[in-house]
């Protein structure tokens, strides 16, 4: 579960592998994010509140980028070999980082989903 930085939206993972985005003033559902094959294990809003990043549990292992207002999928970011346990945006919103139980981190370009680098060296799963 995460609040958007502007406080207007709340996103939460649902048991059916979706993420629901609701308007915090009314409680009305504004978007349902569908595109993971397993439960969503992590999520985060971009600093400008326009994007939501989600990480899929095993065996999905993917990161997805979505438009917060519409639920439109912007990009599918694949490459982790185990559950994505954490996603987060850089303070300027230009980059997205993901951490996985496969003992790696990955850096992505937030607006396009372009892969930048893999981070290795962890001995345990990233959480």
Image: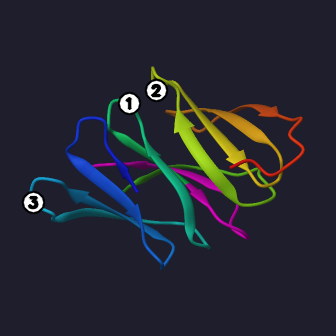
Residue that badge 3 annotates: 26
Q: Name the one closer to the observer, 109 or 85.
A: 85
Separation of residues labelled 3 and 1 (CA atoms):
22 Å
Residue 80: give x, y in percent of width and height. Answer: 77, 52
Horizontally, is 80 left or right of 108 in the view? right
Q: Which residue is mark 1?
A: 47
Q: Earlier in the sequence, mark 2 or mark 1?
A: 1
Q: Is residue 29 left or right of residue 16?
A: left
**Residue most extreme to the left:** 26
State the CA–CA distance, disc 2 to disc 3. 27 Å
**What residue sits 57% from the left and 44% below the top?**
87
Q: Secondary structure at mark 3?
A: loop
Residue at coordinates 86% horizontally, 40% vertically from top-left?
122
> Residue 62 lies in what quarter of the image?
bottom right
59 is within the stretch colored magenta: yes
The stretch of residues the image draws in magenta is: 55-70
Q: Is residue 36 above or below residue 100?
A: below
Say how the picture is coloured: rainbow
Q: CA distance from mark 2 to mark 1?
A: 6 Å
| Residue farthest top in this picture | 92
Q: Which residue is mark 2?
A: 93
- Can you see residue 70? no
Residue at 61% over, 62% down: 56
Residue 66 visible, this angle: yes
Q: Are marks 3 and 1 in contact (CB under 8 Å)?
A: no
Q: Position of residue 15 (x, y in %)?
A: 47, 78
């Amino acid at each position: 579960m995460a609040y958007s930085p502007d406080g207007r939206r709340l996103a939460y993972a649902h048991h059916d592998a979706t993420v629901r985005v609701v308007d915090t003033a009314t409680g009305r559902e504004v978007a349902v994010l569908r595109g993971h094959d397993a439960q969503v294990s992590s999520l985060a809003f971009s600093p400008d509140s326009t994007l939501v990043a989600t990480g899929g549990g095993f065996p999905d292992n993917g990161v997805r980028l979505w438009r917060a207002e519409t639920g439109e999928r912007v990009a599918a970011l694949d490459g982790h070999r185990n559950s994505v346990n954490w996603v987060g945006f850089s303070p300027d919103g230009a980059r997205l980082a993901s951490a996985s139980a496969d003992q790696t981190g990955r850096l992505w370009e937030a607006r396009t989903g372009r892969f930048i680098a893999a981070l290795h060296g962890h001995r345990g799963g990233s959480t």
